[in-house]
Image: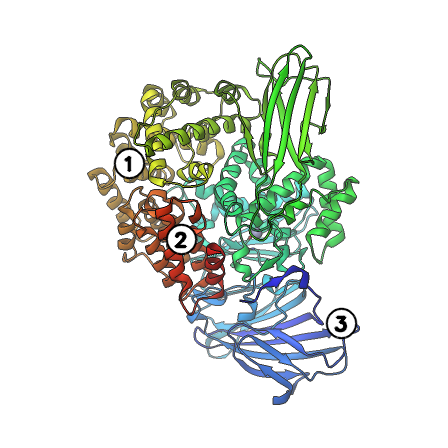
Amino acid sequence: GQAFRLEDYRQSDYLIPELEMIFRLDPEKTLVTTKLLIERRDGVAADVPLVLDGDGLKLEKLLIDGGAVEHNDHEATADSLTITRLPRQSRFEVTIVTRLAPAQNKALMGLYVSNGVYCTQCEAEGFRRISYFLDRPDVLSTYRVRIEAREKEAPLLLSNGNPAESGALEDGWHYAVWHDPFPKPSYLFALVAGDLSAVRDRFVTMSGRGVDLAIYVEHGKEARAAYAMDALKRSMRWDEERFGREYDLDVFNIVAVSDFNMGAMENKGLNVFNDKYVLADPETATDADFANIEAIIAHEYFHNWTGNRITCRDWFQLCLKEGLTVYRDHEFSADQRSRAVKRISEVRTLRAHQFPEDQGPLAHPVRPRRYREINNFYTATVYEKGSEVVRMIRTILGADTFRAGMDLYFERHDGQAVTIEDFVACFEKASGKDLTQFALWYHQAGTPNVTVATSYDARAREYTLEVEQSVPPTPSEARKRLMHIPLAFGLVGPDGQDMAYDGVEGAEVEDGVIHLRKRRHIVRFKGVQARPVASLNRGFSAPITLSLVMRQKDRLFLACHDNDLFSRWEALNTLFTEALIDASTRVRGGKSADFDTTLLGYPAEIAADEGLEAAYRALALTLPAEADIAREIGSNIDPDAIGRAREALRKAIAREAQETFARVYRDLGDDGPFSPDAKSAGRRALRNVLLEYMAAGSGDPASAVRQFETASSMADRAAALSVLAHQFPGGDAARAALAAFEERYRDNPLVLDKWFIVQATTPGGKTVDLVRELMEHPAFSLTNPNRVRSLIGTFASSNQTGFHRSDGEGYRFLADAVLAVEKHNPQVAARLAVAFRSWRSLEKGRQEEARKALARIAGEKELSRDLRDIVERTLA
Ligand code: HT7
Ligand code: ZN
């Protein structure tokens, strides 16, 4: 298929400074009239045709300056409209009428109907499914949108910007007009029409302007939007205080819909959300749900400045808005909650999603140079690694200069569509530093590895780090250039405090950060009074892998004493990972998984250490996931051996710490009325980790049954359900709990998703059959992305022993499911297929089975561009 290349970018010949749209809404026959004010750029000849993008469109009518266009003067296909004869003057008006059937649109791009609500999704290239347009982010227009609908069917009519006018029409129809004064690209256009309830509030901005806020949900769900509204107001205030960014329209609307391909969408003044990221109350939402809602509400709101006011020149620049906005939402959550706990969670997510991407066939730079289907580039690399790159800029420049760079970016580029080079230039200007080498983080794929060897010369009082960097080859980038890696560090002394030193040679070291720029640095710290333990990459200052051979004793010392909480967690996590890799090798060789007793003794200490916040203790006690262990092993992977080793470690820890765990679990108790705040969530997280251990150690489901039956929140109920279903599968307790849960929530699809997830992630070879069976459940639907992701997606991405069943049944199942979903929703199907990406790191038998399943998909004649792109790159 055709690929788009960054170097081929050129400006469009025409611009569309203004447009008017009229929607006459009907589920089967919607008419869209679009009146475009077209402007020819200076220097472009009048005979240069105007070529507008379309996707599956049917042209009903075409006028230029109000007059008909001759047959010979234009060509309309489903995918484009080319007008060859145009007025000589540089500005003219093109009127286009298209006809749509939104009720038939199951791809959920363009205009569609979700549970009776008309809504749109235009990013990245969905606008062209509504009307012919210059559907590219560097064409910015002001929109005036008139919506007409049957009042009974759609009393609520929304679009971007501010409301301008509304009124009644004949035959029970009515209309509303919206005007958005801020020029925007078409991907930020939105329309919503339906019968929804509003939760309203008001926000006064820092300059004293009032903004009417509304969150629209289905009738009866209003109370479940209260937390989202609170998160919105906190986000608006935070952006003023931390970045000086004020909201700019009179209204800010959020709509929750139940059929949505992604999490949410930042359309100007009218954010559309997957209802999963709006609706929450203690009865139905876990603590993770509350935290996700807070983060995503913030993320979409923050896009108003990073994405909307300043947008991307082209889709290669996606990280310009996404990486930066993720960085901003991470900072917001860190300020609202515990910074260390937040950072640990971010790093776990990065390693779970971005590292395998960077280390597999789908690896690409944060700012890619080539794509066949842009939908497949909304990736962990663009989002999460993109955020890490911004974080590194801040680490290198310091907080104040970083803020000065951001201020300059907002000032210089407001109202423009720009590039990563423009963004980086603002920080170069603000700091006076040359960031050319640093910018390789945007341009070069792959996770850099840093190898470190340490030595201490007691006589000379000199501590030496020999540091070497390498970047592994990735698809289409065999040779890599050397990166600028900011490595935050501390030299931890025998008393646990960071040690001072007199001077340093061999690298630039500033404010606790070593700047690696060469392949090899020998960094000598002078005047170090005793042998320290090196704490490196503190706070995960750079998204790298670190190879540092360290005695277990020293790692354990860091796990107990490092004053950087992230590094403390990291030390323990590394100890667990190393132990699990060893154990899985032994298990695979038919031996027993043995563990060092020093390591087994430490979890009880952590659980009982009240000097540590509960959320941190919960994270520290969470063993590396099976996928984390597999990633560290890297090749010839046997997921069953890893599963057994991990289970053995969990049991060994549970037995060793039995009494302490039971006591701490009891003491944490039920802490009264539910509150979603971070402290209460942390207590629940710790209790629930302990519950898992207690069940594993005792082999008795009783405590989980008790918690399931008496839980006063979904957080506790869902945790108990998962202990029962995963540790006692098929047993009476698990069966009873699953049945009770299903009965209690049968009318709440978002909660039933948790029921699907718990079952889909049950370890072991039988789960694939269960998942196939659950696809027949009345609550399951192949056309709703949340259902598909909960049942099929989590099975494939989060059930190592289930998906990787050695006979290949998991792979055959996924191939069938992907092909079934692809028929109506290529975007969601392509995302499901990403679960195959690490197939080459499996042992030979599984590799062959996975390859066959992929080849079967690739062999289908009529594949969508989305799915073909993923499958071919995965097989390449
Ligand atoms: N910017 C939004 C991306 C998005 C999207 C992309 C492709 C297809 C459907 C989509 N829905 C939302 C989400 C965000 O990052 O804020
Ligand atoms: Zn985003």
Q: Which residue is mark 2?
A: 789
Secondary structure, mark 3, is loop
**Residue placed at 36% from the left, 55% from the top?**
814
How far is the residue under mark 1 from the one under mark 3? 66 Å
Q: Quadrant of residue 781?
A: bottom left
Q: Amino acid at mark 2?
A: Arg
- Mark 2 touching mark 3, by CB under 8 A? no
Q: Position of residue 36 (x, y in %)?
A: 65, 75
Q: On screen, 863 above or below 469? A: below
Who comes first in sequence, dot 1 or dot 2?
1
Is 612 placed left or right of 21 in the picture?
Answer: left
Is 852 placed left or right of 167 in the picture?
Answer: left
Q: On screen, 1 above or below 85? A: above
In front: 567, or 402? 567
Whether ligand 1 has any atom under 8 Å from the Cβ at mark 1 is answered as no
Secondary structure, mark 1, is helix
Q: Position of residue 256 (x, y in %)?
A: 47, 56
Who comes first in sequence, dot 2 or dot 3?
3
Residue 551 shows up from this direction:
yes
Q: Amino acid at mark 1?
A: Gln
**Few, some or many residues within 10 Å of mark 3 (<14, 14–19, 20+):** some
In front: 182, or 860? 860
Whether ligand 1 has any atom under 8 Å from the Cβ at mark 3 is answered as no
Q: Amino acid at mark 3?
A: Arg
How far is the residue under mark 1 from the one under mark 2? 23 Å
**Few, some or many residues within 10 Å of mark 2 (<14, 14–19, 20+):** many
Q: Which residue is mark 1?
A: 727
Q: Which residue is mark 3?
A: 41
Who comes first in sequence, dot 1 or dot 3?
3
Secondary structure, mark 2, is helix
Q: Quadrant of residue 598?
A: top left
